[in-house]
Image (cartoon, helix red, strand yellow):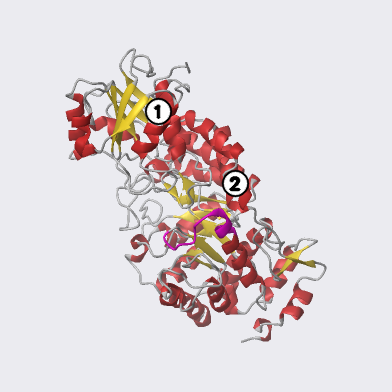
Amino acid sequence: MSPSHRTPSRRAFLSAALTGTALAMTDGAAAAGTAAAVTGSAPDERHLRRLLDGMDLARKVGQLFVVRVYGHRADAPDPVDERANRRLHGVADAAGLIARHHVGGIVYFAHTRNIRDPAQVAALSAGIQRAALALPVPVPVLISIDQEHGTVARIGRPATLLPSAMALGAGGSPADARRAARIAGTELAALGIRQNHAPVADVNTNPANPVIGVRSFGSDPRAVAALVAAQVRGYRAASVAATAKHFPGHGDTATDSHTGLPVLDRTRAQWEALDEPPFAAAVGAGADVVMTAHVVVPALDPSGDPATLSHRIVTGLLRERLGHRGVVVTDSLGMDGVREKYDDDEIPVRALLAGCDQLLNPPRLPRAHQAVMRAVESGRLTEARVDESVLRILRLKHRLGLFGPTRTDPSAVGTAAHLAAADRIAERTTTVLTGHPGLLPLSAATHPRILVTGAAPASTTGTTGPPVAVLAGALAALGFTASTAGAERAEAAAAGHDALLVCTYDVTEADDQRALVARLVATGIPVITLALRNPYDIAHLDGVAASLAAYSWSDTELRAAARVLTGAAAARGRLPVPVPPLFPLGHGLTYPAR
């Protein structure tokens, strides 16, 4: 190893690499400790390069990885499975992960038990930064999460739950999209989470898409581009790195890249017209990060390699054609889509050769780290190429202020102002698809007794209970007599009610939900359906008196749907996707509030 790669003492490093800066103790509600952080006059490019020069190769390679860690504390094993981190990373906890592997990023998940409540998440983030800044070469960790809102939300109540991307598409307001992102970003930053894997920039042109759907703003590239750009600006205003995903586009795929390798069958001209605009808009709005997709696009790269591993796509299109100068993160390297063609040693090396910077969630971090080290030592991957990526990551950490004091504020999560804003935005997104004349908005004078029944999604993040119970409570608060019944007893419970509200969830031709709706329609009582996810459900349901789309099942969206249904709020939303064969893009019945 050359002398320039020897690790200096912490004192010598700080003196040499960060001359002219001051040291400050971390502070904030959950950041007590003695870890030093760079503050005062902010490091410029020269200082960041000195910081890079102070790292040996192992530390540089570590900065490229963003991984999950089990447990709700930085300095303790996961209480549910004490050996979870040892099996995955060979360490006991987050602090050990940082000390041994020098990782540049950690991504939070609910299933890894990182998330209990705001105070705990803030303390975990602060503990991670203390561990990172206590090392001989102190480099802060960039903590990230998938908090798209809607159907993908790792943090639930008491955080503010905002409408899904497709719901925002139904609202059609860039101002609302920006406000939603700023609220989301403000709350993430208050918990020490400074990178969000959002917004989704995919254009959902395939109603049968198994993985994108309501995670997309819609099917119109120009409308999606405007909302993506607005969200990037909203996150940046909150000092959180937005991550536009999944480049070059996952919206017209029929395979889920978690379980297989999708092929995007577009011509180059089609890609430029349909998939490129939102990513170009994200880059133009200053997106800090773009995430790659594990999809094959033969028109863009005939090699058969997924985009994550394609130099033509990552470097040729994203960097050179679109001009993205920021960080490129892979989608999870544990997904089947990227593991179909190459083994786990080869994938991280090929991702770096393609032009990626952050390597997200490899199946085994020690193995992936060693694979990159060997590639550099063999000359297949140059250290200069590694330096390019590390420097981009350091610049991002600097822009986000991570070299300054760690500050968290759990009290900024789920504030009254944020919750009220979410309610107002959600009202503007609920879409009325059909309604018999004179039925909507429902009146407590003519339809006072409502039975709520139907589907219940497996995920309950963002809800205080099953959707049917939340809706019944919201209707009761609006002056209706609302009761609930499970799908198996809904027909028997229907008697004596004036309307039947049925929650639906991804209805198909061979779905039991179709039979339930048909039985309820046969009672002669008006049946109203509310799609809790994709708005395509109504195409498979016959005879209903009215139908609405909420685009997700959070308390926020369910309460908004109840207000629109009953006229407590105006009906304004319009479909951001067509629902063949029934409705075109932009369809939606509107009426004023009572």
Q: Which residues make up the magenta segment?
A: 111-122
Q: Does residue 179 show up?
A: yes
**Quarter of the image with the N terminus in it:** bottom right
Amino acid type for the residue under numbered disc 2: Tyr
121 part of magenta stretch: yes
Which quadrant of the view contains residue 469?
A: top left
In the rendering, which numbered label is found on residue 279?
none
Question: Could you tell me which secondary element the residue under label 1 belongs to?
Answer: helix
Q: Does residue 380 show up?
A: no
The residue to which callout 2 is attached is 235
Locate residue 435, reporting x and y percent. Answer: 32, 19
Could you say which is closer to the camera, residue 474 or residue 93? 474
Residue drawn at x 37%, y 49% as measured from the top left: 459
In the rendering, which numbered label is found on residue 475?
1
594 part of magenta stretch: no
Neighbours of disc 2 within 10 Å: few (<14), some (14-19), many (20+): many
User: Which numbered disc, 1 or 2, marks the residue closer to the eye?
Assistant: 1
Residue drawn at x 39%, y 43% as measured from the top left: 465
Q: How many marks?
A: 2
Could you say which is closer to the camera, residue 85 or residue 283? 85
Locate residue 332, reporting x and y percent. Answer: 43, 61
Q: Are marks 1 and 2 in contact (CB under 8 Å)?
A: no
Which quadrant of the view contains residue 36?
A: bottom right
Could you say which is closer to the camera, residue 586 or residue 357? 586
Amino acid type for the residue under numbered disc 1: Leu
Residue drawn at x 37%, y 50% as measured from the top left: 299
On the rendered structure, is 566 left or right of 93?
left
